[in-house]
Amino acid sequence: MRLLGWLLVLASCGAAQIRTVTLPGKSPLVTFRIVFTTGSAADPADQPGLAYLTAQMISDGGTRDLTYKQVGDALFPMAAGVSAQVDKEMCTFSGATHVDNLAEYYKLLRGMLLTPGWREDDFRRVKDAAVNAIKIGLRGNNDEELGKEVLYETLYQGTPYGHFNGGTVSSLEKISLDDVKAFYKSQYSQSQLIIGIAGGYSPTFLASMKKDFQALPAAASPKPKMSAAAAVDKSRVLIVDKDTRSVAFSIGYPIEVTRARPDYAALLLVSSYLGQHRMSSGVLYDRLREKRGLNYGNYAYIEYFPRGMYLMEPQPNLARQQQIFQVWIRPVEPPTAKFALRLALFELDKLNKNGLTQEAFERTREFLSKYVNVLTRTKRAELGYAIDSLFYGIPPYNDYLKAQLAKLTLADVNRVIKQNIRTDRLVIAAVTRNGEDLKRQLASEDASPMTYNSPKPKEITDEDTLVVKWPLGLKAEDIKVKAVGEVFQ
Amino acid sequence: MIPKLCLLLGCAALAYGAQPQKVFPYAYSQEDLPNGLRLITVPTDYANIVATYIVVQTGSRNEVEPGLTGFAHLFEHLMFRGTEKYPPQKYNQTLNRFGAASNASTSDDLTVYHTTFSKEDLDTVLAMEADRFQHLKYAEPEFKTESLAVLGEYNKNSASPFSKLSEVMQDTAFDKHTYKHTTMGFLKDIKDMPNQYEYSLKFFDRYYRPEYTTILVVGDVKTKAVRAMVDKYWGEWKRGSYKPDIPVEPEQNGPRTGHVDWPSPTLPIVSVAFKAPAYNDATKETAALDALAYLAFSGTSDLYQKLVVQEQKADAISGNAPGSVDPSLFEITARVKKAEDMDYVRERILETVKAFQEKPVDPARLDTVRKRLRYQVALSMDNSDTIAQILSYYVALKRTPETMNALYDQYAKLTPEDVRQAAAKYLVEKGRTIVTLTGAGGGK
């Protein structure tokens, strides 16, 4: 079934400008993923958040013929909805319906995407929500996501990736409804459209859907020229100061590896070994949490992974031409913050020097080869991954990853570690109370002694003698402290 | 072959207005081992993948001793501390080789341990799970370290004002019952956990017993083979005898209020809660309160349209009906854009409650709720893992998937008058608690 779906993709690519990814089946459900290969990287430099507001007006506003309330009333009994996800290079509208309601659901979906209502009162509500998502959601209520997004913004400064997908407060406040309409007109084109559909729909349904979407302009206006993140030439820290109980860290630097590159599988294996998201198998989780009780968890990533505190698995349709390597250290008690940071870097250094053992290599490879089936166990996930594969120009993800993993050797992985894992030239984002105090601590190479509430094995206490004085290599002039109200302003 | 799901859900969808089909569309087996352990096996048509959900009917509700809250949740952590046969590293590495997704969660009434993996690994997964449920072994130093991870979890949750609001709501609304504390437990108790090693052993001995436990196995499996594996690995598990004496909450005799001063800027929150009955599918009350939450407070409700869409004084409103083992709360929560509108929003919520107490809803609107509830199930049951997850909630209440069918049968029978009566009986001033939250710089 998966292979057949893929063949249909290829067949349709040649036949029409609109690309489709189809996974037909006999399920009573029909799943849609309508992707435009444009996003916040296409925001004009002075209008961060424009792509985001445009997508929100479509998913959370009315259509030309129906008010927002009428759309909501119509979707309610179907238990259906349309949600929007905006990333740098993809705007995705997704939803699902029971086949009983397919015609009615599709009529709403079509209205939302092809003839949005663009009402001023919807715009006011959507804009308020976008501003509050930054002021309250990100700055106020979610220290971990805040740290991650600050890290991304810092690393990509000066490039089309250099602002938060949701924009900045001052930019959102200035964007007008006309700006949103203009963005829609210039970017929501057939050339940037991928229609993804799975489940129990008929071929005639798809044909008529494609015909409907030909109402969109054939081509999009040019987007800002993509440029890579500047290399990090020395380690630096951005501390966000806010009233909070604990200290959250995100650490990272740009990498050249993406899903389309030859070293993808090897580096994915390395990040899984270091810290598979929300699993207890990773080295960072084991050393920081299990052995020392420093916090709730610690993970590593080579692809953008927003909303990690709510999600157990990565979401599709966040495909990017550029990625970073990232370590996420969940909140630690302030007295142990410097030690926790040192320990994470100590583990990265150990990995860089020693590489993986044959056992760890084989085990992690086995994990990923099977876990990919768990990741794509739903049609909506399978469809999302298929669309991403089209973006990256790779075969169906499961087959691709399994084949790449099967070819790997320990030597390949250890070479990729040497090339990609490092402890210098990092950007570190921290969210904490008393930012100046953390700055003073990090700028000094003084030891950060660690005490525990229970006896530790000799292996740990011996290791700690190295960790407590592990050189951070940070200078005061490379550590900036910002009040939380200044970020994403 | 047309998958069974397709046929059954198709029928269910056609059945509105007629005799409704059972909402849980799968044939399943439900068997009790002599030791009291219950096994529910649900073969599905989703190939290769199996989900095991092991439900322990123990949550923060079972934490009856003062000063010892949060232990059900602590066990969600401790259960990953290993046994002699499978020390933590071996346990983790085995699951890792299986490519399994494994985790656990705790709420008021249950703790659930879940693993999703390839079907060929079922035997080993059941063996490892049986081993840790029967032979969990952790020394005091590891216990102390794990209790710090719980504090770490409290710390990461503490960034959200909604966590604090829940703490204060439960503490204010309840006097005696263990729903007075959240699943995380009181912070002072979490800080004291490292000193409670001996109590933790007692807690495990009380509740990690077959009579509290139901194993759900959902996916590409054969019922007989699953039973044989469970007999083999779980058959020797010894039944316990402990029954907690959970305090009965005295009747509330007047409205209560609470307030949270949040230290940093955030939008104000108004939460209005009413004491409401325990889950019950033998009557229409639970179903009626569920329907009321949708009718009065969901996105299509008049109140939501007024406050969120038209006046835009609030950016979110939700209503949550209770569904717990013991009487709990029907809660309406609104996030308000300006502190000066908090009283206005609270009054509109109370007016809405009054209106639903006085006048039955339009039967057509009730039909849309019924329809939504059934489609919601159909849309979410699209993989074995989610099917098991949905069932785990119902199994925690009454140890059988029939719980779900019984509740949906009650939805089918509901009348507008049932909804009115439930609102009039339970959403009353005497049993009301209102908790507000304002951020730094916001007025009360």
Image: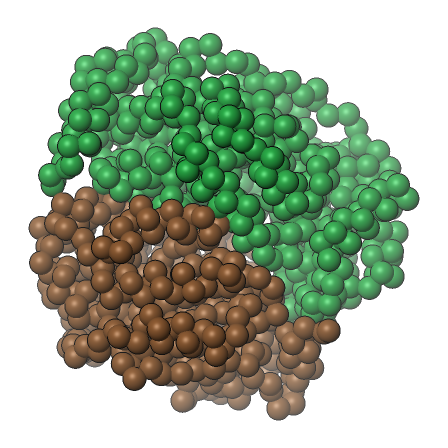
Chain colours: A green, B brown
Q: Is residue B65 above or below residue A34?
A: below
* Vertical position of residue B236 compared to residue B311: above or below: below
Foreground of the two, A54 or B80: B80
Q: Is residue B174 left or right of residue B316?
A: left
Where residue B193 appears, as percent x and y from the top left, is 14, 51
Residue drawn at x 22%, y 47% is B146
Identify the residue at image location x=54%, y=53%.
A374
**Residue B431: horizontal and vertical position, in percent?**
27, 74
**Residue B427 sits in which quadrant?**
bottom left
- List x then y, in percent, for residue A240: 36, 26
Is A402 in front, or is A298? A402
Residue B273 shows in the view: no
Q: Is residue A258 above or below residue B42?
A: above
Residue A67 appears in which quarter of the rendering?
bottom right
The reply to whether residue A33 is visible in this rendering is: yes
Give the residue at x 52% y 49%.
Answer: A371
Q: Quadrant of the N terminus of chain A?
A: bottom right
Q: Residue visible at 58% across and 79% down?
A: B25
